[in-house]
Amino acid sequence: MCATKPINETGHKIQHRAQSQTLVACADLSINTAATLRLKNEVFAKMKADQISLVAKRDPLIRHFGENYLKKHKRAQISVACSNKMRECSRLLIEMRRHTEKKNLPFFEILNPMLFDTVVASARIISGYNDETKIYKAPSLAMHLGTTLKQICDLCSHLLMKDHPDIFCNDKDAKLKELKRFKLLVNSQWSFEISSLAVKDLAEKKWNKPVLLPLTKDIIKFRNQIVNCAETNFELLQQDWTNQQAFKKVIDSALSLTILFNRRKIGDVQYVTIDSYLKNFACVDQTEYLEQLTESEKLLSNTYKRVVAGGKGSRPIIILFPKNVQAYIDLTLQIRNKTNMLSKENPYLFSYPNSKSQWVRADVVIRQFANASGAENPVALTSNRLRKQIATVMQLINLSKEEYAHFAQFMGHTEKTHREYYEITQDAYQMAKMSKILVLFDKGQGLQYKGKSLEDIDIDPTKDLVEACDNSDDDSLSEPPNDRPDNYVSEDSEALDRDNSDNETTTKRKQCKEKDCNSSGIIKKKAKNNRVRWTEEQKKLVKSYFKGHIKKRISPKKEECQTLIDEQPILLKNLDWVKVKTFVYNNYRK
């Protein structure tokens, strides 16, 4: 590495343009609070030095929005998300300035009910909306812009009530009313103007896009590539602790193997700290449970190192480290402790030399290994698709409900998220399983397999499918096969016959009505008519007894009706409590 090359604390080249832009944009800041300093140090330094970033840094309301966003989070990686949020607001403001032809229009002034339509038009433009096709280039941006605007309205109201010097307003009360009305418009109209179409567009793009999962042979090539790289550079690093290139390769290999083995999201692994890795979470007080395990399960529990790290939303994430990965990491930790290759201030387990507070980006590392592995489809080798692949293959394993819940928890999400997002119903499964059901019901044999699972049902792939196709092509109304129940009525046959003869279809419907057929084709027996004729004495008695209920329009309870029947068993012998309650209800409903 060149000694004169300027390096910052993250181990990357200093962004002089970004620093210069930040200096110019923040030159007029009146106060340097802790939040402002954190925003400058963590967010502004990472923003690209372009016009969008300059507008975001100079606008006071966007700047306060970024500060407010940082207050909710303590992890360093949130700075990237904060930068993206601020740049989205800046893009909206730039488009509003173009629409209104005001070069210095602040974000504070666009929160006006009179400009709501202009805000909607600007949001559509920056989201890439096509008015002819009703399609967005960035539908997710269109959806959460509404949420961002509501948050900024609340923030602006908060700053106005505190008389903050960055937010100048002649009539504070009038502006607070404007903010309230603007937020009301966003709440009531944003879904009609933007969100509804964006949600539909996002859903259509999802199911129109082919599902791309990594092949097993590609995963094997991918893993072999990582293992070969790890073993080669591990030996080099053992021989020479000052070999920074070998150190980087060992770190990359350990990170990739951990993600591949655990099928974890990259953010769950790349942010693991040294303290989390060194903590001992061994099952020292669970001897009774360990005795219930098989010998192979006991061996596995002693083979892997269990680490608990913080995941998204501060949820605990379980990560297992195999023996070979443990050896790689232990060597790098030993080098870090005894040499100055890496700063002692860097808390991250996976980090490069000369880096003070930066972690290794796992997405870049995985992409490099995937391209070098010789896989047929390296694009499919991502952490997200690897998670979907294992969730999809796990459908072939007959897990119990408790095992399914434990597996979903280990993967770092709920059962609902696991089922709806990660499990992918493959085309082969739909063709094999679902077509079996459709063929059976098309032949009228569904009732014969009552209480059986799909695995217990077996059909002749030659005979049954040919018959199903022949039946579907037959234009005449065929008689039900001998193996169908005698009371079976084919709805599909009626549908086919409707195209050929309206008269025959009408006759069929009349016959079905006379037999009281239900929608599934099974003849139902007509229910016995239990109506009784009320005498005048019965009506007077019930009306008199429940006159308070009728006046208050309250239905009597079962016990009250039964009490009356017990008091007058002879007069009300042909009535039950339901008929009495219905009579009272009908009287006060008149």
Image (spheres, grey):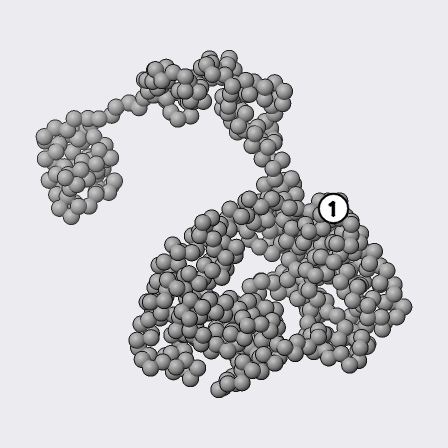
Q: From what the image shows, is residue 512 above or below residue 281?
A: above
Disc 1 packing (10 Å; few <14; some 14–19; many ≥20) = some
**Front residue of this view, candidates 28 and 339:** 28
How many numbered discs, if any? 1
Q: From what the image shows, is residue 300 above or below residue 447?
A: below
Quadrant in the picture for the C terminus: top left
Q: From what the image shows, is residue 70 above or below residue 301?
A: below
Quadrant in the picture for the N terminus: bottom right
Q: Report whether residue 403 is seen.
A: no
Q: Residue at x 55, y 77 (%)?
A: 39
Query: To which quarter of the image does residue 549 belong?
Result: top left
Residue occupied by mark 1: 376
Query: To which quarter of the image does residue 316 belong?
Result: bottom right
Q: Is residue 392 left or right of residue 161?
A: right
Q: Is residue 338 left or right of residue 347?
A: right
Q: Residue at x 54, y 82 (%)?
A: 26
Name the residue at the right extreme: 239
**Front residue of this view, candidates 566 and 482:** 482
Q: Residue at x 60, y 73 (%)?
A: 49
Where residue 28 appears, x then y in whole percent?
50, 85
Does dot 1 land on a helix, a strand or a loop? Answer: loop
| Amino acid at dot 1 | Glu
**Front residue of this view, candidates 221 and 15:** 15
Q: Residue at x 42, y 73 (%)?
A: 102
Where residue 376 appears, x then y in whole percent?
74, 46
Q: Report whether residue 558 is seen.
A: yes
**Front residue of this view, candidates 315 and 581:** 315
Name the residue at the bottom extreme: 30
Where residue 462 appears, x then y in whole percent?
63, 20
Name the residue at the front extreme: 101
Where residue 83 appears, x then y in whole percent?
56, 70
Q: Is residue 564 left or right of residue 470?
A: left
